[in-house]
Amino acid sequence: MDIFTKEYINYLESLITIFTVDKGIVKVLLIRKQTDPYKGYWSLPGDGLKNNETLENNITDALLDQTGLLNVYIEQCYTFSALNRNSEERVIATSFMGIVDSVSAVIKRQDRPNIISEWFPINDIPKMAYDHEAVIKKNIEFLKRKIVNINTLKAFFPSDFTLPEIQKVYEQILGKTFDRRNFRKKFVGLNLIEDTNEKNIGFNGRPAKLYKFKENIKQIDLF
Amino acid sequence: MDIFTKEYINYLESLITIFTVDKGIVKVLLIRKQTDPYKGYWSLPGDGLKNNETLENNITDALLDQTGLLNVYIEQCYTFSALNRNSEERVIATSFMGIVDSVSAVIKRQDRPNIISEWFPINDIPKMAYDHEAVIKKNIEFLKRKIVNINTLKAFFPSDFTLPEIQKVYEQILGKTFDRRNFRKKFVGLNLIEDTNEKNIGFNGRPAKLYKFKENIKQIDLF
DNA sequence: GCAAAAGTGTTTTCAATACACCCATGG
DNA sequence: CCATGGGTGTATTGAAAACACTTTTGC
Protein backbone atom coordinates (compact mmCIF):
# COMPACT_ATOMS: atom_id res chain seq x y z
CA MET A 1 0.00 0.00 0.00
CA ASP A 2 1.04 3.56 -0.57
CA ILE A 3 -1.29 5.10 1.99
CA PHE A 4 1.32 5.98 4.59
CA THR A 5 1.69 9.53 3.35
CA LYS A 6 0.66 12.90 4.69
CA GLU A 7 -2.76 13.13 3.07
CA TYR A 8 -3.77 9.82 4.65
CA ILE A 9 -2.91 10.87 8.20
CA ASN A 10 -6.03 10.76 10.34
CA TYR A 11 -6.81 11.38 13.99
CA LEU A 12 -9.32 9.26 15.83
CA GLU A 13 -11.09 9.37 19.12
CA SER A 14 -13.37 7.01 20.96
CA LEU A 15 -16.54 8.21 22.66
CA ILE A 16 -18.84 6.30 24.96
CA THR A 17 -22.42 6.66 26.10
CA ILE A 18 -22.68 4.93 29.45
CA PHE A 19 -26.16 3.94 30.50
CA THR A 20 -27.43 3.05 33.93
CA VAL A 21 -30.74 2.95 35.72
CA ASP A 22 -31.08 5.20 38.75
CA LYS A 23 -34.23 4.84 40.86
CA GLY A 24 -36.12 3.62 37.83
CA ILE A 25 -34.83 6.30 35.46
CA VAL A 26 -32.47 5.39 32.59
CA LYS A 27 -29.57 7.84 32.55
CA VAL A 28 -26.34 8.57 30.68
CA LEU A 29 -23.03 9.77 32.07
CA LEU A 30 -21.77 13.12 30.77
CA ILE A 31 -18.72 15.25 31.49
CA ARG A 32 -18.81 19.02 31.71
CA LYS A 33 -16.36 20.83 29.44
CA GLN A 34 -14.32 23.31 31.45
CA THR A 35 -12.31 24.77 28.59
CA ASP A 36 -13.10 26.30 25.23
CA PRO A 37 -14.38 25.37 22.74
CA TYR A 38 -17.84 24.55 24.10
CA LYS A 39 -16.88 25.60 27.64
CA GLY A 40 -19.79 24.80 29.96
CA TYR A 41 -21.32 22.37 27.50
CA TRP A 42 -21.47 18.65 28.24
CA SER A 43 -19.60 15.92 26.43
CA LEU A 44 -19.20 12.18 26.27
CA PRO A 45 -16.27 10.43 27.94
CA GLY A 46 -13.61 9.43 25.44
CA ASP A 47 -10.03 9.93 24.33
CA GLY A 48 -7.78 10.30 21.34
CA LEU A 49 -6.61 6.99 19.89
CA LYS A 50 -2.88 6.30 19.95
CA ASN A 51 -1.53 4.18 17.13
CA ASN A 52 -0.52 1.37 19.48
CA GLU A 53 -3.88 0.63 21.05
CA THR A 54 -7.20 -0.75 19.92
CA LEU A 55 -10.42 1.24 20.12
CA GLU A 56 -11.73 -1.15 22.75
CA ASN A 57 -8.64 -0.80 24.98
CA ASN A 58 -8.65 2.93 24.47
CA ILE A 59 -12.24 3.48 25.53
CA THR A 60 -11.91 1.12 28.49
CA ASP A 61 -8.84 2.99 29.70
CA ALA A 62 -10.41 6.39 29.10
CA LEU A 63 -13.47 5.38 31.05
CA LEU A 64 -11.45 4.18 34.02
CA ASP A 65 -9.32 7.30 33.95
CA GLN A 66 -12.15 9.80 33.60
CA THR A 67 -14.88 8.19 35.67
CA GLY A 68 -13.33 5.38 37.66
CA LEU A 69 -15.74 2.88 36.11
CA LEU A 70 -14.32 -0.60 35.72
CA ASN A 71 -15.55 -3.80 34.09
CA VAL A 72 -18.15 -2.01 32.05
CA TYR A 73 -20.19 -3.91 29.47
CA ILE A 74 -19.37 -2.17 26.16
CA GLU A 75 -20.32 -2.55 22.51
CA GLN A 76 -19.12 -0.65 19.49
CA CYS A 77 -21.83 1.40 17.80
CA TYR A 78 -20.80 3.65 14.93
CA THR A 79 -17.94 5.63 13.42
CA PHE A 80 -18.55 9.31 12.67
CA SER A 81 -16.39 10.80 9.94
CA ALA A 82 -18.11 14.03 8.90
CA LEU A 83 -15.43 16.60 8.07
CA ASN A 84 -16.82 19.29 10.35
CA ARG A 85 -17.90 17.16 13.32
CA ASN A 86 -15.06 18.41 15.46
CA SER A 87 -14.82 22.19 15.43
CA GLU A 88 -11.04 22.33 15.34
CA GLU A 89 -9.16 19.89 13.19
CA ARG A 90 -10.65 16.83 11.54
CA VAL A 91 -11.15 14.01 14.02
CA ILE A 92 -12.97 10.75 13.36
CA ALA A 93 -14.91 9.29 16.28
CA THR A 94 -15.91 5.71 16.99
CA SER A 95 -18.71 5.56 19.50
CA PHE A 96 -19.42 2.86 22.04
CA MET A 97 -22.40 2.04 24.17
CA GLY A 98 -21.77 0.96 27.74
CA ILE A 99 -23.93 -0.23 30.60
CA VAL A 100 -23.29 -0.25 34.34
CA ASP A 101 -25.56 -1.36 37.14
CA SER A 102 -26.80 1.14 39.69
CA VAL A 103 -24.34 0.03 42.37
CA SER A 104 -21.24 0.40 40.22
CA ALA A 105 -22.58 3.66 38.85
CA VAL A 106 -22.01 5.56 42.06
CA ILE A 107 -18.40 4.52 42.48
CA LYS A 108 -16.83 7.43 40.66
CA ARG A 109 -13.42 8.87 41.18
CA GLN A 110 -13.35 11.89 43.46
CA ASP A 111 -9.62 12.51 43.11
CA ARG A 112 -10.10 14.48 39.93
CA PRO A 113 -11.74 17.77 40.93
CA ASN A 114 -11.26 19.05 37.39
CA ILE A 115 -13.52 16.36 35.94
CA ILE A 116 -17.18 17.13 36.58
CA SER A 117 -19.42 14.27 35.62
CA GLU A 118 -23.14 13.82 36.07
CA TRP A 119 -25.90 11.38 35.18
CA PHE A 120 -28.70 12.75 32.97
CA PRO A 121 -32.04 11.10 32.12
CA ILE A 122 -32.03 10.03 28.48
CA ASN A 123 -34.97 12.29 27.69
CA ASP A 124 -33.41 15.30 29.37
CA ILE A 125 -29.99 15.68 27.76
CA PRO A 126 -28.29 19.07 28.35
CA LYS A 127 -26.55 21.14 25.67
CA MET A 128 -23.80 19.03 24.19
CA ALA A 129 -20.41 19.92 22.71
CA TYR A 130 -19.45 19.06 19.11
CA ASP A 131 -21.74 16.44 17.54
CA HIS A 132 -22.13 14.57 20.79
CA GLU A 133 -25.88 14.99 20.84
CA ALA A 134 -26.10 13.13 17.51
CA VAL A 135 -23.72 10.50 18.86
CA ILE A 136 -25.93 9.94 21.92
CA LYS A 137 -28.99 9.66 19.70
CA LYS A 138 -27.32 7.04 17.54
CA ASN A 139 -26.17 5.14 20.60
CA ILE A 140 -29.65 5.18 22.11
CA GLU A 141 -30.95 3.74 18.85
CA PHE A 142 -28.30 1.07 19.15
CA LEU A 143 -29.31 0.30 22.72
CA LYS A 144 -32.91 0.07 21.57
CA ARG A 145 -31.99 -2.77 19.24
CA LYS A 146 -29.73 -4.43 21.82
CA ILE A 147 -31.85 -4.24 24.95
CA VAL A 148 -34.04 -7.11 23.79
CA ASN A 149 -30.98 -9.29 24.22
CA ILE A 150 -30.76 -10.99 27.57
CA ASN A 151 -27.06 -10.27 28.07
CA THR A 152 -27.52 -6.57 27.46
CA LEU A 153 -30.36 -6.47 29.95
CA LYS A 154 -28.27 -8.41 32.45
CA ALA A 155 -25.63 -5.67 32.34
CA PHE A 156 -28.18 -3.34 33.95
CA PHE A 157 -29.09 -5.91 36.60
CA PRO A 158 -26.19 -8.21 37.44
CA SER A 159 -27.64 -8.95 40.88
CA ASP A 160 -31.13 -8.57 42.35
CA PHE A 161 -33.91 -6.80 40.53
CA THR A 162 -37.67 -6.56 40.57
CA LEU A 163 -39.91 -7.12 37.59
CA PRO A 164 -41.40 -3.60 37.73
CA GLU A 165 -37.83 -2.22 37.54
CA ILE A 166 -37.03 -4.19 34.42
CA GLN A 167 -40.34 -3.27 32.88
CA LYS A 168 -39.63 0.42 33.42
CA VAL A 169 -36.22 0.11 31.75
CA TYR A 170 -37.83 -1.48 28.72
CA GLU A 171 -40.55 1.10 28.61
CA GLN A 172 -38.12 4.01 28.65
CA ILE A 173 -35.69 2.59 26.13
CA LEU A 174 -38.25 1.16 23.72
CA GLY A 175 -40.59 4.11 24.19
CA LYS A 176 -43.75 2.13 24.80
CA THR A 177 -45.65 0.73 27.75
CA PHE A 178 -46.41 -2.86 28.70
CA ASP A 179 -49.22 -4.41 30.65
CA ARG A 180 -47.82 -5.46 34.01
CA ARG A 181 -49.51 -8.85 34.04
CA ASN A 182 -48.56 -9.75 30.49
CA PHE A 183 -45.00 -8.55 31.03
CA ARG A 184 -44.62 -10.72 34.09
CA LYS A 185 -46.24 -13.69 32.41
CA LYS A 186 -43.85 -13.54 29.48
CA PHE A 187 -40.73 -12.80 31.49
CA VAL A 188 -41.28 -15.51 34.07
CA GLY A 189 -42.25 -17.93 31.31
CA LEU A 190 -38.82 -17.53 29.72
CA ASN A 191 -37.35 -19.44 32.65
CA LEU A 192 -34.36 -17.12 32.91
CA ILE A 193 -34.85 -15.81 36.42
CA GLU A 194 -35.32 -17.21 39.90
CA ASP A 195 -36.99 -15.85 42.98
CA THR A 196 -34.58 -14.82 45.75
CA ASN A 197 -37.41 -14.98 48.30
CA GLU A 198 -36.54 -11.45 49.32
CA LYS A 199 -38.51 -8.27 48.93
CA ASN A 200 -37.71 -4.77 47.87
CA ILE A 201 -38.78 -3.02 51.08
CA GLY A 202 -38.60 0.65 51.94
CA PHE A 203 -40.68 2.02 49.06
CA ASN A 204 -44.26 3.10 48.79
CA GLY A 205 -46.85 0.41 48.26
CA ARG A 206 -46.56 -3.33 48.31
CA PRO A 207 -42.93 -4.44 48.12
CA ALA A 208 -41.88 -6.15 44.90
CA LYS A 209 -40.28 -9.57 44.86
CA LEU A 210 -36.57 -9.65 44.18
CA TYR A 211 -35.37 -11.92 41.39
CA LYS A 212 -31.97 -12.74 39.94
CA PHE A 213 -30.86 -14.16 36.64
CA LYS A 214 -30.01 -17.83 36.57
CA GLU A 215 -26.44 -18.91 35.87
CA ASN A 216 -25.48 -19.93 32.33
CA ILE A 217 -28.59 -18.71 30.60
CA LYS A 218 -28.36 -19.06 26.86
CA GLN A 219 -28.22 -15.99 24.63
CA ILE A 220 -31.75 -15.22 23.52
CA ASP A 221 -33.83 -12.29 22.40
CA LEU A 222 -36.97 -11.38 24.29
CA PHE A 223 -39.57 -9.19 22.61
CA MET B 1 -7.04 18.88 22.41
CA ASP B 2 -3.45 17.84 22.32
CA ILE B 3 -3.90 14.79 20.17
CA PHE B 4 -2.39 16.12 16.99
CA THR B 5 1.00 14.62 17.69
CA LYS B 6 2.97 11.76 16.23
CA GLU B 7 1.73 9.01 18.51
CA TYR B 8 -1.87 9.80 17.60
CA ILE B 9 -1.35 9.50 13.85
CA ASN B 10 -3.54 6.74 12.48
CA TYR B 11 -4.24 5.32 9.05
CA LEU B 12 -7.70 4.19 8.07
CA GLU B 13 -9.25 2.28 5.27
CA SER B 14 -12.78 1.50 4.25
CA LEU B 15 -13.84 -1.98 3.18
CA ILE B 16 -17.11 -3.10 1.69
CA THR B 17 -18.93 -6.38 1.33
CA ILE B 18 -21.23 -6.02 -1.65
CA PHE B 19 -24.12 -8.47 -1.78
CA THR B 20 -26.25 -9.41 -4.73
CA VAL B 21 -28.48 -12.28 -5.72
CA ASP B 22 -27.48 -14.16 -8.86
CA LYS B 23 -29.90 -16.81 -10.17
CA GLY B 24 -31.20 -17.32 -6.67
CA ILE B 25 -27.79 -17.46 -4.98
CA VAL B 26 -26.67 -14.70 -2.61
CA LYS B 27 -23.13 -13.66 -3.49
CA VAL B 28 -20.42 -11.19 -2.49
CA LEU B 29 -18.02 -9.31 -4.71
CA LEU B 30 -14.32 -9.96 -4.13
CA ILE B 31 -11.12 -8.72 -5.74
CA ARG B 32 -8.11 -10.89 -6.38
CA LYS B 33 -4.86 -9.61 -4.94
CA GLN B 34 -2.19 -9.53 -7.63
CA THR B 35 0.68 -8.36 -5.48
CA ASP B 36 2.27 -9.45 -2.25
CA PRO B 37 1.38 -9.70 0.55
CA TYR B 38 -1.38 -12.25 0.09
CA LYS B 39 -0.82 -12.46 -3.66
CA GLY B 40 -3.49 -14.68 -5.19
CA TYR B 41 -5.75 -14.32 -2.18
CA TRP B 42 -9.04 -12.47 -2.41
CA SER B 43 -9.91 -9.20 -0.74
CA LEU B 44 -12.76 -6.79 -0.20
CA PRO B 45 -13.04 -3.60 -2.27
CA GLY B 46 -11.90 -0.56 -0.31
CA ASP B 47 -9.38 2.22 -0.08
CA GLY B 48 -7.26 4.25 2.28
CA LEU B 49 -9.04 7.21 3.82
CA LYS B 50 -7.68 10.66 3.02
CA ASN B 51 -8.12 13.29 5.69
CA ASN B 52 -10.41 15.40 3.53
CA GLU B 53 -13.12 12.83 2.84
CA THR B 54 -15.74 10.98 4.85
CA LEU B 55 -15.81 7.21 5.12
CA GLU B 56 -19.05 7.14 3.15
CA ASN B 57 -17.64 9.24 0.28
CA ASN B 58 -14.47 7.23 0.32
CA ILE B 59 -16.11 3.84 0.02
CA THR B 60 -18.54 5.06 -2.63
CA ASP B 61 -15.66 6.42 -4.71
CA ALA B 62 -13.55 3.32 -4.19
CA LEU B 63 -16.41 1.13 -5.29
CA LEU B 64 -17.01 3.11 -8.46
CA ASP B 65 -13.30 3.14 -9.24
CA GLN B 66 -12.65 -0.54 -8.57
CA THR B 67 -15.86 -2.14 -9.78
CA GLY B 68 -17.82 0.48 -11.71
CA LEU B 69 -20.78 0.04 -9.38
CA LEU B 70 -22.83 3.20 -8.90
CA ASN B 71 -25.75 4.14 -6.65
CA VAL B 72 -25.16 1.24 -4.31
CA TYR B 73 -27.21 0.91 -1.13
CA ILE B 74 -24.64 1.04 1.67
CA GLU B 75 -24.64 0.89 5.45
CA GLN B 76 -21.77 1.17 7.88
CA CYS B 77 -21.13 -2.00 9.88
CA TYR B 78 -18.11 -2.06 12.14
CA THR B 79 -14.65 -0.62 12.75
CA PHE B 80 -11.78 -3.07 13.16
CA SER B 81 -8.83 -1.79 15.16
CA ALA B 82 -6.83 -4.87 16.16
CA LEU B 83 -3.14 -3.98 16.05
CA ASN B 84 -2.15 -6.89 13.81
CA ARG B 85 -5.11 -6.96 11.44
CA ASN B 86 -3.06 -5.57 8.57
CA SER B 87 0.17 -7.45 8.08
CA GLU B 88 2.28 -4.39 7.29
CA GLU B 89 1.72 -1.23 9.29
CA ARG B 90 -1.20 -0.60 11.60
CA VAL B 91 -4.34 0.27 9.64
CA ILE B 92 -7.82 0.64 11.08
CA ALA B 93 -10.68 -0.49 8.87
CA THR B 94 -14.30 0.58 8.83
CA SER B 95 -16.45 -1.93 7.04
CA PHE B 96 -19.60 -1.32 5.05
CA MET B 97 -22.31 -3.56 3.76
CA GLY B 98 -23.64 -2.87 0.28
CA ILE B 99 -26.40 -4.32 -1.87
CA VAL B 100 -26.90 -4.22 -5.63
CA ASP B 101 -29.62 -5.79 -7.71
CA SER B 102 -28.77 -8.50 -10.21
CA VAL B 103 -29.01 -6.17 -13.21
CA SER B 104 -26.59 -3.58 -11.83
CA ALA B 105 -24.29 -6.33 -10.62
CA VAL B 106 -23.18 -7.32 -14.10
CA ILE B 107 -22.24 -3.80 -15.16
CA LYS B 108 -18.62 -3.91 -14.10
CA ARG B 109 -15.75 -1.95 -15.53
CA GLN B 110 -13.78 -3.81 -18.15
CA ASP B 111 -11.21 -1.06 -18.70
CA ARG B 112 -9.14 -2.19 -15.73
CA PRO B 113 -7.52 -5.47 -16.75
CA ASN B 114 -5.41 -5.37 -13.58
CA ILE B 115 -8.49 -5.57 -11.34
CA ILE B 116 -9.90 -9.07 -11.26
CA SER B 117 -13.23 -9.21 -9.48
CA GLU B 118 -15.63 -12.08 -9.06
CA TRP B 119 -18.88 -12.90 -7.27
CA PHE B 120 -18.73 -15.71 -4.70
CA PRO B 121 -21.63 -17.46 -2.96
CA ILE B 122 -21.70 -16.45 0.71
CA ASN B 123 -21.20 -20.01 1.84
CA ASP B 124 -18.28 -20.59 -0.51
CA ILE B 125 -15.82 -17.80 0.28
CA PRO B 126 -12.28 -18.34 -1.08
CA LYS B 127 -9.08 -17.75 0.88
CA MET B 128 -9.06 -14.12 1.97
CA ALA B 129 -6.23 -11.65 2.57
CA TYR B 130 -5.63 -9.96 5.95
CA ASP B 131 -8.64 -10.22 8.29
CA HIS B 132 -11.12 -9.88 5.45
CA GLU B 133 -12.75 -13.21 6.16
CA ALA B 134 -13.63 -11.98 9.66
CA VAL B 135 -14.86 -8.74 8.15
CA ILE B 136 -17.14 -10.58 5.75
CA LYS B 137 -18.48 -12.69 8.59
CA LYS B 138 -19.29 -9.62 10.65
CA ASN B 139 -20.94 -7.98 7.66
CA ILE B 140 -23.06 -11.05 6.95
CA GLU B 141 -24.20 -10.95 10.58
CA PHE B 142 -25.08 -7.31 10.04
CA LEU B 143 -27.03 -8.14 6.88
CA LYS B 144 -28.84 -10.85 8.82
CA ARG B 145 -30.18 -8.24 11.21
CA LYS B 146 -30.94 -5.77 8.44
CA ILE B 147 -32.58 -7.99 5.84
CA VAL B 148 -35.81 -8.06 7.81
CA ASN B 149 -36.11 -4.37 7.00
CA ILE B 150 -38.13 -3.64 3.92
CA ASN B 151 -35.71 -1.03 2.54
CA THR B 152 -32.78 -3.39 2.75
CA LEU B 153 -34.73 -6.07 0.94
CA LYS B 154 -35.79 -3.55 -1.69
CA ALA B 155 -32.12 -2.91 -2.49
CA PHE B 156 -31.91 -6.47 -3.79
CA PHE B 157 -35.09 -6.11 -5.84
CA PRO B 158 -35.65 -2.52 -6.98
CA SER B 159 -37.80 -3.69 -9.90
CA ASP B 160 -39.64 -6.93 -10.65
CA PHE B 161 -39.23 -9.99 -8.50
CA THR B 162 -41.00 -13.23 -7.74
CA LEU B 163 -41.96 -14.45 -4.31
CA PRO B 164 -39.87 -17.63 -4.56
CA GLU B 165 -36.85 -15.44 -5.34
CA ILE B 166 -37.35 -13.35 -2.23
CA GLN B 167 -37.99 -16.40 -0.15
CA LYS B 168 -34.70 -17.95 -1.28
CA VAL B 169 -32.81 -14.77 -0.35
CA TYR B 170 -34.28 -14.87 3.14
CA GLU B 171 -33.56 -18.53 3.51
CA GLN B 172 -29.90 -18.15 2.59
CA ILE B 173 -29.25 -15.06 4.70
CA LEU B 174 -31.23 -16.10 7.75
CA GLY B 175 -30.14 -19.72 7.42
CA LYS B 176 -33.55 -21.31 7.75
CA THR B 177 -36.35 -22.43 5.48
CA PHE B 178 -39.90 -21.18 5.15
CA ASP B 179 -43.09 -22.85 4.04
CA ARG B 180 -43.96 -21.50 0.61
CA ARG B 181 -47.64 -20.99 1.37
CA ASN B 182 -47.09 -19.32 4.72
CA PHE B 183 -44.34 -17.14 3.31
CA ARG B 184 -46.61 -15.91 0.54
CA LYS B 185 -49.52 -15.39 2.89
CA LYS B 186 -47.49 -13.21 5.21
CA PHE B 187 -45.69 -11.26 2.51
CA VAL B 188 -48.78 -10.49 0.47
CA GLY B 189 -50.66 -9.63 3.67
CA LEU B 190 -48.17 -6.87 4.42
CA ASN B 191 -49.63 -4.92 1.53
CA LEU B 192 -46.22 -3.77 0.32
CA ILE B 193 -46.18 -5.30 -3.14
CA GLU B 194 -48.37 -5.27 -6.22
CA ASP B 195 -48.85 -7.77 -9.02
CA THR B 196 -47.34 -6.66 -12.33
CA ASN B 197 -49.54 -9.16 -14.18
CA GLU B 198 -46.43 -10.53 -15.82
CA LYS B 199 -44.74 -13.86 -15.43
CA ASN B 200 -41.23 -15.08 -15.04
CA ILE B 201 -41.09 -17.30 -18.14
CA GLY B 202 -38.19 -19.32 -19.48
CA PHE B 203 -37.54 -21.46 -16.42
CA ASN B 204 -38.50 -24.98 -15.49
CA GLY B 205 -41.94 -25.52 -14.10
CA ARG B 206 -44.86 -23.18 -13.75
CA PRO B 207 -43.76 -19.56 -14.20
CA ALA B 208 -43.85 -17.40 -11.08
CA LYS B 209 -45.82 -14.17 -10.92
CA LEU B 210 -43.77 -11.00 -11.07
CA TYR B 211 -44.39 -8.44 -8.35
CA LYS B 212 -42.96 -5.02 -7.58
CA PHE B 213 -42.78 -2.95 -4.42
CA LYS B 214 -45.34 -0.20 -4.08
CA GLU B 215 -44.21 3.42 -4.03
CA ASN B 216 -43.77 5.17 -0.67
CA ILE B 217 -43.99 2.11 1.52
CA LYS B 218 -43.27 2.93 5.12
CA GLN B 219 -40.21 1.57 6.86
CA ILE B 220 -41.20 -1.64 8.60
CA ASP B 221 -39.63 -4.87 9.75
CA LEU B 222 -40.93 -8.17 8.47
CA PHE B 223 -40.10 -11.35 10.38
C1' DG C 1 -57.74 3.07 57.13
C1' DC C 2 -56.11 5.08 53.14
C1' DA C 3 -52.89 5.69 49.36
C1' DA C 4 -49.52 3.52 46.58
C1' DA C 5 -47.63 0.00 44.06
C1' DA C 6 -47.33 -5.19 43.27
C1' DG C 7 -49.14 -9.78 42.60
C1' DT C 8 -52.46 -12.86 40.29
C1' DG C 9 -55.88 -15.57 36.24
C1' DT C 10 -58.99 -15.84 32.41
C1' DT C 11 -60.75 -14.77 27.94
C1' DT C 12 -60.11 -13.16 23.38
C1' DT C 13 -57.70 -12.23 19.32
C1' DC C 14 -54.47 -12.69 15.89
C1' DA C 15 -50.45 -14.38 13.89
C1' DA C 16 -47.53 -18.52 13.02
C1' DT C 17 -47.55 -23.22 11.75
C1' DA C 18 -48.74 -27.38 9.54
C1' DC C 19 -50.39 -29.53 5.76
C1' DA C 20 -52.22 -31.50 0.33
C1' DC C 21 -53.83 -30.64 -4.00
C1' DC C 22 -54.03 -28.37 -8.40
C1' DC C 23 -51.87 -25.46 -12.16
C1' DA C 24 -48.72 -23.67 -15.84
C1' DT C 25 -44.82 -24.23 -18.35
C1' DG C 26 -40.68 -26.85 -20.90
C1' DG C 27 -39.16 -30.70 -23.03
C1' DC D 1 -47.46 -36.85 -20.79
C1' DC D 2 -44.22 -36.20 -17.51
C1' DA D 3 -41.13 -33.59 -14.66
C1' DT D 4 -40.50 -29.27 -12.41
C1' DG D 5 -41.64 -25.65 -9.72
C1' DG D 6 -45.52 -22.20 -8.46
C1' DG D 7 -50.09 -20.97 -6.75
C1' DT D 8 -53.93 -21.70 -3.47
C1' DG D 9 -57.09 -22.72 1.22
C1' DT D 10 -58.09 -24.54 5.74
C1' DA D 11 -57.53 -26.20 10.33
C1' DT D 12 -54.66 -26.00 14.46
C1' DT D 13 -51.68 -24.10 17.71
C1' DG D 14 -49.62 -20.78 20.50
C1' DA D 15 -48.35 -16.37 21.77
C1' DA D 16 -49.86 -11.56 22.55
C1' DA D 17 -53.32 -8.50 24.15
C1' DA D 18 -57.06 -7.04 26.91
C1' DC D 19 -58.85 -6.75 31.23
C1' DA D 20 -60.27 -6.26 37.28
C1' DC D 21 -59.60 -7.52 41.71
C1' DT D 22 -56.82 -8.62 45.74
C1' DT D 23 -52.52 -8.08 48.64
C1' DT D 24 -48.79 -5.88 51.10
C1' DT D 25 -46.47 -2.23 52.70
C1' DG D 26 -45.79 3.05 54.58
C1' DC D 27 -47.80 6.76 56.71
Image: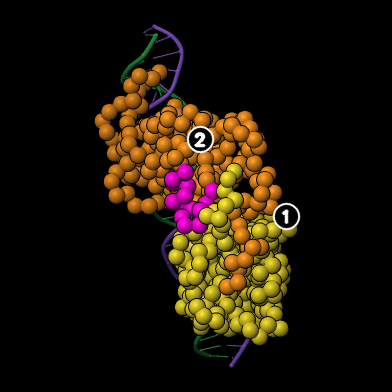
Chain colours: A yellow, B orange, C green, D purple
Task: Judge from the rendering whether residue D20 lies leftward or rightward of residue A45; answer left or right.
Answer: left
Q: Disc 2 is attached to a residue of which chain?
A: B
Can residue A137 be seen?
no
Mark carried by residue B50: none
Most foreground residue, A188 or A125: A125
Q: Callout 2: few (<14), some (14-19), or many (20+) C-alpha neighbours within 10 Å?
A: many
* Position of residue A24 measured from the top left corner of the image (x, y, whole percent): 56, 75
Number of labelled discs? 2
Residue occupying the point 26% across, 30% down = B197
Q: Disc 1 is attached to a residue of which chain?
A: A
Where are the magenta residues, as a range?
B48-62
Residue occupying the point 71% across, 69% down = A70
Task: Judge from the rendering whether residue A3 lies leftward or rightward of residue B167; answer left or right.
Answer: right
Query: Residue type at mark 2?
Result: Leu
Furthest-left residue in view? B197
Residue occupying the point 58% across, 62% down = A12
Mark 1 — residue? A216
